[in-house]
Image: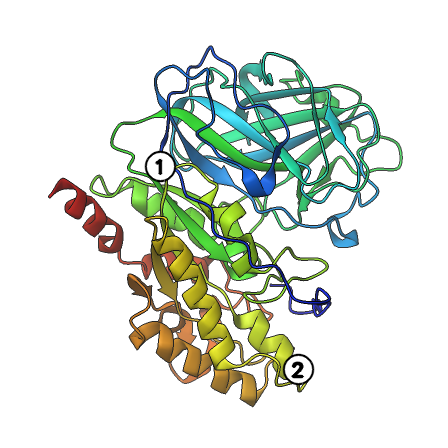
Amino acid sequence: MDEDRDGSDRSTGERSRRDVLRAGGVLTGVALSGPGLAAGVPAGDADPTDDEDADEGGTIGTWAASPQQPTDDAGHVRGFRDRTIRNVVRTSVGGAGVRVRFTNAYGRGSLTIDDASVGIWDADSRTVRGGTRPVPFDGDGSVTIRPGERAYSDPVPLEVGPERDVAVSLYAAAPTGPPTTHEDARRTTYLAAGNRVDDADGSAFSSPPAGESDVTASWFLLEGLDVVDPAPDVGGSIVCLGDSITDGVGSSLDANATYPDRLAERVNGDPGVRRSLLNAGIGGNRLLDDTSCCGSAAVERFEDDVLARPGVTDVVLLAGINDVGYAARKRAADVTVDDLVSGMERIVEGAHGNGVRVVGGTLTPFRGASYYTAGGERVRRTVNEFVRTGGAFDGVVDFDEAIRDPDDPRRLRPAYDSGDHLHPNDDGYRAMAEAVDLDLFRDLDDEEDG
């Protein structure tokens, strides 16, 4: 959410309103030995069921990160040359193999990934346990991705469990140009000079290239990890769509302490509710308007960041506080309650048209944040009343009630405040996850069984 950013740069003219894509179910027919989707599928046209060479099995998303424009805050804004990037991500469900989704969504030119690998990451030793596995694309070791496009790898025979760390390493020999980024990963990413994708002991990543750091806290050129042949009782994916509160700003680095992380732990601990959890939060993101730093508006990126993921059954929507805060700070009447309600209803309509349920989250308190105003607070409360009682959603999570100060409901509870009066801390994110009624997802299973 990054309240200190003014993402008020609006796209000129009328924004195009693309029709929402059909959402696929669990992607069936993926053989661990067969080729994957052709590289460079346009991001807006991705159909995860186009694998004509598929055999048996299924694929479902286990981890995701929504693409952002490259920014100075993320570092390496000019890109990489002759560098290996080791992104570390965490699964929500396991499977017999994996597929990797690389992205050039915001690239200015074509991106060539010359080599890539995956492996099980041991955070304590900073090593890849059991060695790395090569990541091929249609049988080739490299792939070129045109601007605005993504590439899916072939299935890789790497067995992973739920809540396990995976190292996804990529090497680019030629300059990448400004790289598509996910700025606030809340995870450490490692860098090395030369092609070090097969470095399992981590030694190549302990000495940074001259003039550079060997670590960063952003993900680069990576937007998803899917698992092949998940457990048969995994019934789909829950996508958490939102801003930096969903992204986990304010949580501890490398602690897996965002509310979607904690929700994944709860879901994995309940045998009656088996879903993967995908985080589609972006710091600074808005419900209604695009920004120059923080991704497309949630209503616009919904199809790519939610519906294009394989196996999505449910969305938890928590978005709008940036729209409220920025508008109030500018003393402009350009975002109204009706605007926000309309945006939420648009997402619900698109989801329902694709057989996906939407759980609405109430906007959390923000008194004391730099963009707080009394007028913005009135808008927040009115929007929350719509979320709770408007009947638009298939279910409601009252995040507001879960983490607000009982002595001043306009504020975060002090024990849950990360310090900026906007973002929760680790305990606050845990409280948010615990506020989610898992029966919201169990009901869908019951209906299908009936």
Location of residue 427 (image quadrant): bottom left
- Toward the bottom, the furthest residue is 374
Q: Which label lies toward us, 1 or 2? A: 1
- Residue 207 locus on image (x, y percent): 79, 28
Q: Nearer the viewer, residue 374 or 149?
A: 149
Mark 1: amino acid: Gly
The residue drawn where x is 39% and y is 56% is 316
Determine whether the residue tagged by mark 2 lies in a helix, strand or loop: helix
Classify 10 Å Cα crowding around label 1: few (below 14), some (14-19), many (20 and above): many
- The answer to whether residue 264 of the structure is visible from this angle is yes
Determine the residue located farthest toward the right in the rendered image: 211
Colouring of the image: rainbow
The residue sitting at 47% across, 18% down in the picture is 158
What residue is drawn where x is 71% and y is 57%? 293
| 333 displayed left or right of 353 | right
Residue picked out by circle 2: 329
Looking at the image, which is closer to me, 264 or 46?
46
Label located before the other in sequence (1 or 2): 1
What amino acid does circle 2 point to?
A: Arg
Above or below for 407 versus 442: below
The N terminus lies in quadrant? bottom right
Quadrant of residue 419 in the image?
A: bottom right
Residue 369 visible in the shown view: no
Above or below for 433 versus 49? below
Which residue is label 1 attached to?
25
The percent position of residue 341, horizontal first and vertical second, equals: 44, 74
The quarter of the picture where the C terminus appears is top left
Question: Residue 215 vs residue 366: left or right?
Answer: right
